[in-house]
Amino acid sequence: NDLYAVVGHPISHSKSPRIHSLFAQETGEAVEYTAIQAPLDDFDGTVRQFFERGGKGLNVTVPFKEQAWQLADQRTARAAKAGAANTLFLDEHGKLVADNTDGCGLVRDLTGNHGLALGGARILVLGAGGAVRGVLGPLLAEAPAALTVANRTVAKAEALAVLFQDEAQATALTACGFEQAQGPFDLIINGTSASLQGDLPPLPANVITGGTTVYDMMYSLQTTTFNQWALDHGANRVCDGLGMLVEQAAESFRIWRGVTPQTTPVMDVLRND
Ligand code: ATR
């Protein structure tokens, strides 16, 4: 079997080994996929050792996505702009290539699994960290009418709006603080880690109407804090990040194996695990 792994710290909670085993079963690909906890001070050594021992590909998760991006010899266009990488592999010359499949995974989940039309939509994205930076390019490629990045530290949102301005062809791309977000929005995507601290971004209630879909990039068995807040304020629909997780994994699998796995059966299995 060809060896793949996800690297992070901590890593025991990762669903990637389960997801990729299901993909391997479904496609009949000879893939073995494990989880590796890299020491916080030796991500690079862990990656080098993995590939020296014949490993074929890595997924990278918190807190190493920026380091993976740094370490790579080459980056795909979408990874270059994202400034973070979640997928590593060697090219035919043995060079380490970094890709980022997070944004593609989010867009596929929104449009394919949830049936949302992003073209012409008014979108609010919360947060301006690595998670958000990874998804802005693919979201803008769908040509929403407006995309507002709101963040606790406004300067970080403003910097992202400047960085991605060249990809915002048909889209009014703007930045603001949470309190200044000017609704209503068709779609609100939470890419902050606020809920990890049980916090809610202080948004004006009028960002949500009965037509608003809310997507929390976090995945949890219970309704997330943010999605509960959205439901309490009359959101039409709330989604968590499970679909994004499975779709980004499917895109990594495709890059490594040249085979695109079916994602719906895998999401069903994970919901019932
Ligand atoms: P990630 O890789 O998950 O994006 P990150 O780069 O550390 O992690 O970014 C975390 C994001 O969540 C940031 O946008 C952060 O806001 P700041 O840029 O102001 O730090 C946001 N965040 C974290 N804790 C938060 C909280 N309690 N309330 C609101 N936003 C929060």
Image (cartoon, rainbow, N blue to C red):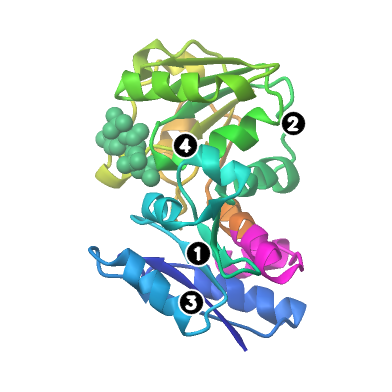
Nearer mark to the viewer, of 1 and 3: 3
Residue identifier under label 2: 117
Tell me the residue at 53%/49% (across/down).
241
Q: Quadrant of residue 210?
A: top right
Mark 3: few/some/many CA within 10 Å (<14, 14-19, 20+): some
Range shown magenta: 249-273
**Whereabouts is ligand 1, in terms of quadrant?**
top left
Which kind of residue does numbered mark 3 sit on? Phe
Contact, mark 2 vs mark 1 (Cβ under 8 Å):
no
Q: Residue at horizontal 62%, vertical 68%?
A: 93
Please determine whether, in this image, residue 143 is positioned above or below residue 35: above
Label 4 or label 3, whichever comes before in sequence order: 3
Q: Amino acid at mark 2?
A: Ala
Q: Residue furthest front?
A: 93
Foreground tag (2 vs 3): 3
Specify few, some or many for label 2: CA neighbours under 10 Å numbering under 14, 14-19, or 20 or more: some
* Residue that carries the numbered disc 4 in the rendered image: 132
Residues tagged 1 and 3 counted as in contact (Cβ below 8 A): no
Q: Position of residue 220 (x, y in %)?
A: 44, 55
Instruction: Single out the mark in the foreground, 2 or 1.
Output: 1
The circle drawn on residue 59 is: 1
Upstream in sequence: badge 4 or badge 1:
1
Q: Earlier in the sequence, mark 2 or mark 1?
A: 1
- Which residue is under mark 3? 51
Disc 1 versus disc 3: distance between alpha carbons?
A: 13 Å
Q: Is residue 268 magenta?
A: yes
Left or right side of 24 for 131: left
Label 4 near ligand 1 (CB < 8 Å): yes
Q: Mark 4 or mark 1: which is in front?
A: 1
Q: Nearer the viewer, mark 4 or mark 2?
A: 4
